[in-house]
Image (cartoon, rainbow, N blue to C red):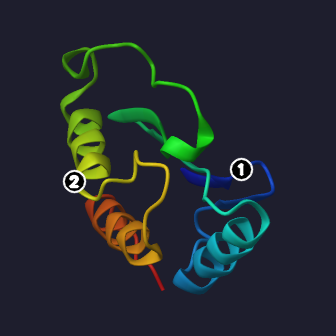
Amino acid sequence: MITIDFGGNKKLSTPNITTASVRHAYKESLNNSGNVCVQVIIEHENAKVSLSSGACGGSGSGKPIEAFSREAQHIIKLWHKYNLNEDSFPFGKLVRFLKELFKKFGIQLA
């Protein structure tokens, strides 16, 4: 299960996540606050991880990356690859992250 939470205002979960629904929630969140607080929660047998953009505040779990499963480490590195831990980021980076993430789990992002 993958859930995307846009600042507590809009939640999307698999299998109902599409590029269009993410775009709508992203733009709505951006219009409301100027920055997008997005949290992606992955609950999979080999990877349980919650990732938040910088606009959400907080500083992460405090656990070193090595404390996570290999699958979770890969996802965390992917999150940082697209700089989604920053306060602001373009919509395209979020979509590219989601496409790679979904491909990893055999899910098609429409």
For residue 7, which numbered disc appears in the image?
A: 1
Tell which circle, 2 or 1, labels the residue nearer the N-terminal end.
1
Residue 40 in sight from this viewpoint: no
Residue shown at 59% from the left, 33% from the top: 57
Residue shown at 59% from the left, 80% from the top: 23
Q: Residue extending furthest front? A: 34
Where does the image place residue 48, in percent across and percent down from the top left?
43, 32
Please tell me in which quadrant of the rendered image residue 31 appears: bottom right
Q: Viewed as shown, does residue 87 lie left or right of 98?
A: right
Tell me the residue that label 2 is attached to.
81
Residue sitting nearer the eye, 90 or 19: 90
Q: Viewed as shown, does residue 52 lie left or right of 104?
A: right
Residue shown at 81% from the left, 56% from the top: 9
Where does the image place residue 68, in percent across and percent down from the top left?
28, 22
Amino acid tagged 2: Lys
Amino acid tagged 1: Gly
* Above-or-below relation of 77 to 2: above
Where does the image place residue 93, in percent across and percent down from the top left?
36, 70
Where does the image place residue 8, in percent across and percent down from the top left?
77, 48
Residue shown at 71% from the left, 65% from the top: 29
* Above-or-below relation of 94 to 62: below
- Secondary structure of residue under mark 2: helix
* Mark 2 Cα-neighbour bin, 10 Å: few <14, some 14–19, many ≥20: few
